Amino acid sequence: MNLLESIAKTLRLCVILSVVLAVIGLIAEHMGSSYGEVLTWLAVLILILSPFMGAIAATTSLAYQKDRKWAAFGAVLIIVSLMGMAIALIR
């Protein structure tokens, strides 16, 4: 699988999963379930994290293609993103 296909499939999967969870969450919330709001927020979280998942897919694809320079760049991007997420969670 090439780089663009892996990124596209990852982003597509994230969007589809998010839409399905949002619809299920809205239906559950309409029916009075306490899990409806949780599922809706999970759908939003997946949408927020989808670019990060795309970066992981790109870095993995680059590593399989043995493109070390860009795979290393992707790894640095992932590490910086994880550090930013950790700092945001701590505050």
Image (cartoon, grey):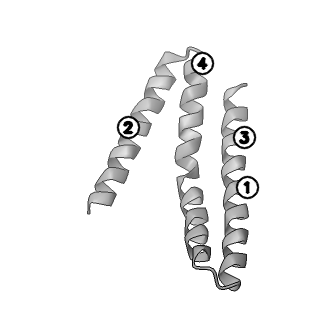
Q: Which of marks 1 and 4 is nearer the N terminus?
A: 1
Residue that badge 4 annotates: 64
Residue designated by label 1 = 16
Residue that carries the numbered disc 2 in the rendered image: 79
The disc labelled 2 sits on which kind of residue?
Ile
Disc 3 secondary structure class? helix
* Residue 6 in picture, x, y percent from top left: 68, 34
Disc 1 residue type (three-letter): Ile
Distance (Cα) linking label 1 and label 4: 26 Å
Q: Name the residue under label 3.
A: 9
Q: Is mark 2 on a helix, strand or loop?
A: helix
Amino acid at pointer 4: Tyr
Left or right: 62, with 31 as reference point: left
| Residue type, mark 3 in image | Lys
Query: Residue at coordinates 55% horizontally, 20% vertically from top-left?
Result: 63
| Number of the front mark, 1 or 4 | 1
Q: Are marks 4 and 2 in contact (CB under 8 Å)?
A: no
Q: Distance between the residues labelled 4 and 2?
A: 19 Å
Query: Residue 26, how many percent across, how many down?
Result: 69, 77
Asked if residue 51 is positioned above or below residue 33 in the image, the reply reads above
Figure quadrant of the C terminus: bottom left
Q: Residue 25, which numbered label?
A: none
